Image: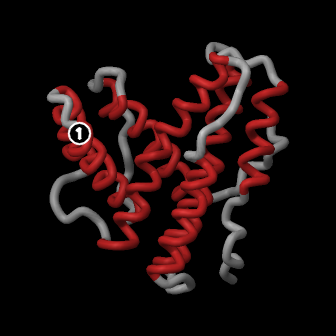
């Protein structure tokens, strides 16, 4: 059974996560804190995976699928107000990671999977483009890599070990969440600890 429009992910859901982050002492070195941030990211990736899966199964047409993705993107990538600068930076990292997830999903729905290159080759091409400060190409390569996740390919995170920390590393982190969401699309309970 398909999900009613607008029910894949709501502003209220995103705000519940943000409220939890406001209330908790966040230490990225602490496992519980890191898990909270990862759950926030994975929760969004699951919603994206659900839309694309329903599109693939013919339950959603292209235009409504793209509209639903745009709604979630607008919610998740909107500017967040936090008094705590460190928490704001952590949220920004999650949002940055998710940018590539949205691009990959939109590209897949609008044009299908990338036809040339493996996930690893595309990620390496993205890292090379970033090294040359061509961020548009870097994002395009990462999004193409992401389209292959929807085809059932796997992202081997070993490829991330060779990448300098930067935008591509963040985007690959988002793709890792997407891969997890596609493999195990269980909704994360906001109260999971």
Quadrant of residue 162 in the image? top left
Q: Is residue 187 left or right of residue 68?
A: right
Quadrant of residue 59 in the image? bottom right
On screen, 33 above or below 146? above
On screen, 105 above or below 122? below
Q: Is residue 99 left or right of residue 138?
A: right
Residue depicted at x 66% and y 81%: 2
Question: Where in the figure is residue 131, as x and y percent of width and height?
Answer: 19, 26
Q: Which type of secondary structure does the marked residue at label 1 adopt?
A: helix
Residue 184 appears anywhere in the view:
no
| Foreground residue among 83 and 142 | 83
Question: Where in the figure is residue 158, as x and y percent of width and height?
Answer: 34, 31
| Foreground residue among 163 and 69 | 69
Residue depicted at x 50% and y 69%: 52
Question: Where in the figure is residue 141, as x and y percent of width and height?
Answer: 25, 48
Q: Which residue is mark 1?
A: 126
| Foreground residue among 39 and 166 | 166
| Foreground residue among 42 and 64 | 64
Residue depicted at x 67% and y 66%: 8
Residue 169 appears anywhere in the view:
yes
Q: How many marks?
A: 1
Q: Is residue 132 left or right of residue 36?
A: left
On screen, 30 above or below 95? above
Quadrant of residue 31 in the image? top right
């Amino acid at each position: 059974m398909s999900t009613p429009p607008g029910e894949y992910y709501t502003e209220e859901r995103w705000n519940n996560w943000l409220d939890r982050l406001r209330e908790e002492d966040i230490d990225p070195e602490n496992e519980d804190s890191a898990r909270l941030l990862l759950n926030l990211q994975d929760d969004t990736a699951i919603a994206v995976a659900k839309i694309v899966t329903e599109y693939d199964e013919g339950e959603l047409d292209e235009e409504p699928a793209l509209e639903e993705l745009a709604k979630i993107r607008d919610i998740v990538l909107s500017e967040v107000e936090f008094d705590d600068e460190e928490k704001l930076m952590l949220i920004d990292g999650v949002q940055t990671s998710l940018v590539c997830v949205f691009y990959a999903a939109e590209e897949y729905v609008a044009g299908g999977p990338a036809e040339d290159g493996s996930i690893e080759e595309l990620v390496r091409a993205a890292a090379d483009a970033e090294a040359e400060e061509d961020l548009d190409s870097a994002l395009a390569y990462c999004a193409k890599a992401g389209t292959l996740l929807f085809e059932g390919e796997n992202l081997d995170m070993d490829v991330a070990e060779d990448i300098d920390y930067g935008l591509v590393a963040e985007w690959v982190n988002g793709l890792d969440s997407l891969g997890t969401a596609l493999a195990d699309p269980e909704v994360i309970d906001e109260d999971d600890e």
